[in-house]
Image (cartoon, rainbow, N blue to C red):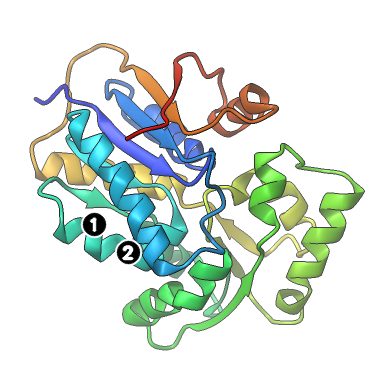
Amino acid sequence: MDSRPIGVFDSGLGGLTVVKSIKALLPSESIIYFGDTARVPYGNKSRELIKEYSSEITEFLVKKDSKMVVVACNTVSAMVLSTLKKNNSIPILGVIAPGVAEAISITNNKYIGVIGTIATVNSDAYNTALKALDSNIETISQACPLFVPLAEEGWLEGDVVNMVVAHYLSPLKEKNIDTLILGCTHYPLLKNAIANQFNKTTVLIDSADAVARAVQKKLSDFDLLNNKDEKGSLFCFVTDIPMHFETVGQQFLGSPLESVQIVHDF
């Protein structure tokens, strides 16, 4: 039994969707969440800058005695996950592999759409991971750079949101996809607007639940599970507190953010 916390981080607040799923599956586990709200989004930044930011945050979480770190950011998972794993002795888990496995298990016609940040799409990480599991998969990818700012500002519905979503997803609507991977932890907040662009048979993959199951397996494999019959804590660290922070954070997490601390030097 290991009562140390799980570290989770993202470029902003989107990773709280993963925290929500982990808390639901593993209520005894304590979690330290780091949201880099001052430097969001990561999707339009260079690989070197993403590596620098994510390495800083991982080091911060390790110093907080995290027993594992969940990279709840598709951009970081796509660009520098292998580097983070190589440079740290504790388990490091990304979000791409669990979502890919779920999409493979669901698709019937093997046409899978992927939406994500510019960096995630350009990395080709999803296509590579999908083809590795099934070489017959056809992947159609689309970058949606305005989705993260919309989610971070709490713009989840309305004419502006629908117009932006329709603009980005129009190329995918022309394809015969039956499965769509939401390749960014911010995108589940826009799920309704996204789903409205497709017919009801198209399945949207929100990898948060799949990631939580992967966390459970990883902790079990390394004998790191906390089996105490008690509710785990949640502490949040951010690099800035933007307008609407509490409202938007609650939308991501599904409950109020109770303990939040700003970190400037780490």
- Neighbourhood count class around disc 1 (C-alpha, 10 Å): few under 14, some 14–19, many 20 upward: many
Left/right of residue 89 with respect to residue 204 in the rendered view: left
Residue drawn at point x = 61 percent, y = 47 percent: 188
Residue 117, quarter of the rendered image: bottom right
Relative height, residue 53 to residue 4 (above, below): below
Give the residue type that dot 1 points to: Leu
Which residue carries the number 2 mark?
80
Tell me the kind of residue under disc 2. Val
In the rendered image, the vertical position of residue 127 relative to residue 7, given as above or below: below
Give residue 84's mark: 1
Front residue (pair 173, 64): 64
Secondary element under disc 1, as helix, strand or loop, is helix
Is disc 2 surrounded by few (<14), some (14 to 19) or many (20+) residues within 10 Å?
A: some
- The secondary element bearing badge 2 is classed as helix
Res. 206 visible in picture: yes
Q: The C terminus lies in which quarter of the figure?
A: top left
